[in-house]
Image (cartoon, rainbow, N blue to C red):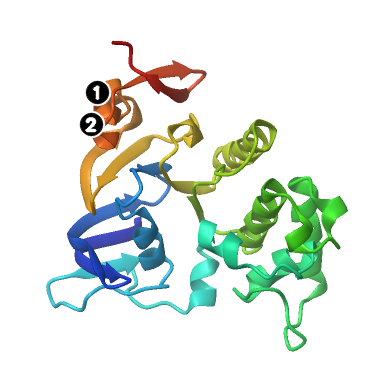
């Protein structure tokens, strides 16, 4: 089991539109990876395929495996792969209290419910995560009364309750101010340094931290470039991906795009 996921000749529709037509893509276990592309490149569809929110077109010639299996119980999958997505944040119940947001990760549910039981160990784990993420003072605050950055940290805690081997992050700093962005990226970096694999799906180049070693370019449902970060993240490569003139500036392992000079 040496891959987080493996797609071979995968075709998939979303909202009646063909997004992938024979996609081949895989990410190895332990490989910190960024999947970068403009809006409409298929990033959201890829996330939904991995998390089993949607399914590919059935074909004897296609294969779609997550941790070596083609079928998963969703709760069991979450113990291997934690997911923090924009859709989850938008759709999460606004009345759920912070502590319950994290505890809901044990059942892959939205909020917690009376029939769901939690052991003292699970509750202690939730409390520990709130402290680690700096949101323990918000344990009783409703999700809808939190800032975007606070919500994002609680959803990260929700994804971490099972101590997953890998995290799949969807544009993690979108909508955050500079302080909240730096805090979130610092948490992601620490997780990678401690051995948690991160797969980052984004169109924001500045979100790609130094610990990411592989970058995949996606455009219009296809992989157009794939390889070592330093080889892939070039001014000409990013200019072609986003169809505009870009100059990349590298600082402290981060890459910042600015308009190319005439």
Q: Residue furthest front?
A: 262
> Which residue is located at x 78 percent, y 53 percent?
130
Looking at the rendered structure, the secondary structure element under dot 1 is helix
Look at mark 1 in the image and give the residue it sits on: 236
Q: Residue furthest bottom?
A: 115
**60 shown above or below 217:** below
Residue 13: image x %, image y %?
26, 70
Residue 189: image x %, image y %?
58, 37
Residue 49: image x %, image y %?
36, 67
In the image, taking residue 16 as reference, residue 198 lies left or right, namely right
In the image, taking residue 164 as reference, residue 214 lies left or right, namely left
Q: CA separation, marks 1 and 2?
A: 6 Å
Q: Quadrant of the C terminus?
A: top left
In the image, taking residue 110 as reference, residue 126 lies left or right, namely right
Q: Quadrant of the N terminus?
A: bottom left
Look at mark 2 in the image and give the residue it sits on: 240
Dividing the picture into quadrants, the one containing residue 35 is top left
Does the rendering let one see residue 73? yes
Q: Residues within 10 Å of mark 2 (few under 14, many from 20)?
A: few
* Disc sitting over residue 91 in the figure: none
- Front residue of 102/203: it is 203
> Which residue is located at x 49 percent, y 76 percent?
74
How many labels, in total?
2
Looking at the rendered structure, the secondary structure element under dot 2 is helix
Mark 1 near mark 2, Cβ–Cβ under 8 Å? yes
Q: Residues within 10 Å of mark 1 (few under 14, many from 20)?
A: some
> Which residue is located at x 34 percent, y 72 percent?
69
Does the rendering let one see residue 67? no
């Amino acid at each position: 089991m040496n891959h987080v996921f493996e797609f071979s000749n995968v075709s998939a529709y979303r909202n009646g539109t063909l997004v992938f037509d024979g996609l081949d893509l895989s990410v190895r276990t332990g490989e910190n990876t960024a999947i970068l592309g403009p809006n409409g490149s298929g990033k959201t569809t890829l996330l939904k395929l991995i998390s089993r929110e949607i399914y590919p077109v059935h074909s004897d010639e296609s294969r779609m495996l997550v941790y070596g299996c083609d079928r998963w119980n969703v709760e069991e999958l979450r113990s291997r792969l934690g997911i923090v997505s924009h859709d989850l944040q938008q759709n999460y119940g606004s009345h759920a209290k912070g502590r319950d947001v994290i505890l809901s990760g044990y059942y892959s549910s939205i909020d917690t419910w009376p029939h769901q039981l939690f052991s003292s160990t699970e509750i202690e784990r939730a409390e520990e995560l709130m402290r680690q993420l700096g949101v323990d003072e918000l344990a009783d605050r409703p999700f809808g009364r939190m800032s975007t950055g606070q919500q994002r940290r609680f959803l990260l805690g929700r994804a971490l309750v099972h101590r997953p081997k890998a995290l799949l992050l969807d544009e993690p700093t979108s909508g955050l101010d500079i302080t909240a962005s730096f805090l979130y990226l610092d948490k992601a970096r620490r997780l990678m340094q401690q051995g948690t694999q991160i797969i980052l799906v984004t169109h924001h180049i500045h979100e790609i931290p130094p610990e990411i070693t592989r970058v995949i370019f996606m455009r219009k449902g296809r992989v157009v470039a794939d390889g070592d970060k330093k080889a892939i993240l070039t001014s000409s490569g990013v200019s072609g991906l986003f169809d505009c003139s870009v100059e990349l500036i590298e600082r402290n392992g981060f890459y910042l795009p600015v308009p190319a000079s005439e």
